[in-house]
Amino acid sequence: MPKMKTKSSVKKRFKVTGTGKLTVAQAGKQHGMIKRSNKFLRNARGTMVLSEPDTRIVKKYMPYAGK
């Protein structure tokens, strides 16, 4: 059997933690910072852990990410 391919969009956006959870960058930081509050910008720094239902969807596109 040939190897299964990982979705290119998924490998660019998500990382798998040691426990199998997915981390993703916070949303809402691409443009339009003037209209966002300072509190929002502070809280949207860095990464966050993806929710469990979303993790199940994304992991279907990552065949070798570990279950």
Image (tube, rainbow, N blue to C red):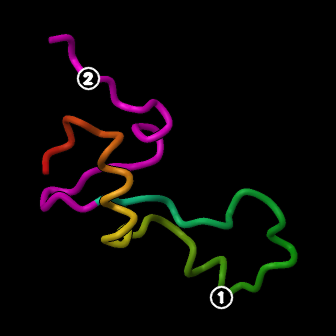
The residue that disc 1 covers is 39
Q: Is residue 10 magenta?
A: yes
Of the image marks 2 and 1, the number of the one nearer the N terminus: 2
- Name the kind of residue labelled 2 in the image: Met
Q: Is residue 30 magenta?
A: no
Q: Residues within 10 Å of mark 2 (few under 14, many from 20)?
A: few
Magenta span: 1-21
- Where residue 49 appears, as percent x and y from the top left, is 35, 69
Q: Secondary structure at mark 2?
A: loop
The residue that disc 2 covers is 4
Q: Nearer the viewer, residue 47 or 38?
A: 47
Count of numbered tags: 2
Q: Hey, which quadrant is residue 30 in on the image? A: bottom right
In this view, the residue farthest toward the top is 2
Q: Secondary structure at mark 1?
A: helix
Left or right: 28 in relation to 10: right
Left or right: 32 in relation to 61: right
**Quadrant where the image shows the N terminus:** top left
Q: Where 3 sits versus 65, above or below? A: above
Left or right: 63 in relation to 23: left
- Name the kind of residue labelled 1 in the image: Lys
Between the C-alphas of marks 2 and 1, the distance is 42 Å
Which of label 2 and label 1 is nearer to you? 2
Left or right: 48 in relation to 15: right
- Where residue 67 appears, as percent x and y from the top left, is 13, 51
Q: Hey, which quadrant is residue 17 in on the image? A: bottom left
Q: Residues within 10 Å of mark 1 (few under 14, many from 20)?
A: few
Tags 2 and 1 touching, CB below 8 Å = no
Q: Where 20 sits versus 45, above or below? A: above
**Which disc is residue 28 wearing?**
none
Q: Residue at x 76, y 85 (%)?
A: 37
Q: Residue at x 50, y 37 (%)?
A: 9
